[in-house]
Amino acid sequence: MTYQAWTTPTAPPLAPQVLHDHITAWRMAVFGAAILVVLVFSQAWVFPLLGDAGNPAMDVVVRNLYFPAYGLVLFLAALTPLSVTLAAIRQPFLITLMLIVGLSITWSIAPDMTMRRVIAIYATTLGGIVLGARYRWAELAEVLGTAFAILGVIAFIVPLAVPSIGVMHELFPGAWRGVWPEKNAMGGIMALSFAILSGAAMLNPQRAKIWWGFAALSVVLILMSTSKTSLVSVMLGFGVLIFVTLVRRSPAVGVATVWLAVLGVGAVAFVAIFASDLVFKALGKDATLTGRTEVWTAALRLIEQRPWTGYGYAAIWDDEDRWAPLAKIVKEAGWRPHHPHNTWIETWLGLGVFGLASWGFCFLQTLTLALIAAFRNPGAYLALPFLVIYGLQSLTETVAVTYNDFRWVIFVAIAIKLVWPDREVRTPPGVI
């Protein structure tokens, strides 16, 4: 009788597949963490908590709810510390700006408040640096696009399901505001949303239909907000997207497109200067831009008293003392603003001449690199439309060097990405 040894069949090696699954799960977790950071800094959850009248008892709660985002930012930075550091030092004007923000504690009229907000702006800025250093252009577009898609869906559902929150009732009754305090806030965010989502569509053609669908939703929300300025911003952003598309076709088309763009900008500037009444009428604004110019005048008078240092980062707008600088602004403007509705004036007011210069050079450098990228880098599909809309908004809103604000996070991410070439981020060995 012949005996045959029993053998156990050899299973095919599973280790590579298991490792691949673990790495994929890890990358998805990090991707989700990045999206969550953007969503927290969007402040879309703040207004539903505070309401129209505000709730002072919730102020501390709101402040503390940003700490998880700070923790996630530190976590993401710790994954690629060398890339984050090397990317940051390529933006010297941004570093200088942040140094001045920190030094402003020493001359702030409210040093305790400035110190607390310096920590917040550092965490917010680090969030943008991490996103720009970690992700390739296409991936960055999808991180930001996913966050804006979620915000767009929420902003569409809330006015329908909870109109007491999502629709304005006293001022501009019937205008949608989504989950933000007023219609123009939602309109401005949706204008940036269109720029980001259309950039995601151009950089990720395999999912372009999805991203264009969400971009269309952004336009619908702008129409429901009745914000004419935001609608103009979207049209401008779409025009910039076409500009990038054309200049990337061929050198000859690029040159012709640049000349047409220069003529177009010149024509718009001519109308704005010599027929400003028509522009105000088309936008539904008066010559004071709904009271903004009175605030600008009052703020500039304060700047004349401390032009070199300013009053300290974010130190003015919550000081309710009757002799504080804010009281002078309220008296001269005739109403109580919460910021000057101008990024450049706010920066000068808080950080002085050198802070203003640092921000100005940072923005100019970033915009110049985005224009150059239009001829060399597909990342311009994301960068240039966003920067043009962002720059336009900076004239009537405070959107730069703002703590806990995802508009600043996105600007910093794009500024870093423009000086930090695409590269594959490798998962550290043993990390799952």
Image (cartoon, rainbow, N blue to C red):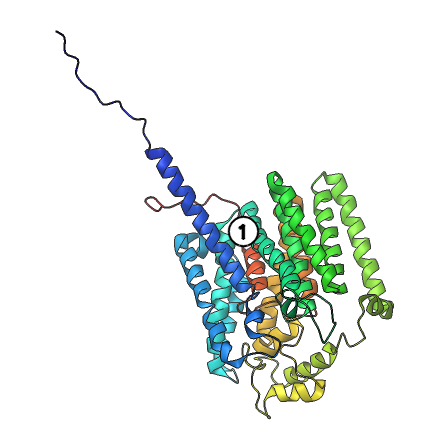
Residue at image coords 61%, 71%: 356
Relative height, residue 208 to residue 105 (above, below):
above
Disc 1 crowd rating (10 Å Cα; few below 14, some 14-19, many 20+) is many
Choose between 335 and 126: the one closer to the eye: 335
Residue 54, percent from left and from top = 58, 78
Which quadrant of the structure image shows residue 255?
A: top right
User: Of all residues shown, which one is farthest toward the top?
Assistant: 1
Q: Residue furthest front?
A: 161
Q: Determine the secondary structure under disc 1.
A: helix
Q: How many marks?
A: 1
Asked if residue 364 shows in the view, the reply is no
Task: Kindly identify which residue carries mark 1.
Answer: 143
76 vs 70: above or below:
above
Q: Position of residue 217 (x, y in %)?
A: 68, 53
Q: Is residue 306 left or right of residue 14?
A: right
Q: Quadrant of the N terminus?
A: top left
Q: Is residue 321 visible?
A: yes
Q: Which residue is more in the foreground, 258 or 410?
A: 410
Q: Position of residue 348 (x, y in %)?
A: 62, 75
Q: Name the image quarter holding residue 308.
A: bottom right
Q: Quadrant of residue 97?
A: bottom right
Quick check: 352 above or below 371?
Answer: below
Residue drawn at (54%, 80%), measured in percent from left and top?
A: 315
Which residue lies most toward the left here? 1
- Residue at image position (61%, 44%) is 203
Closer to us: 181 or 413: 181
- Amino acid, disc 1: Val
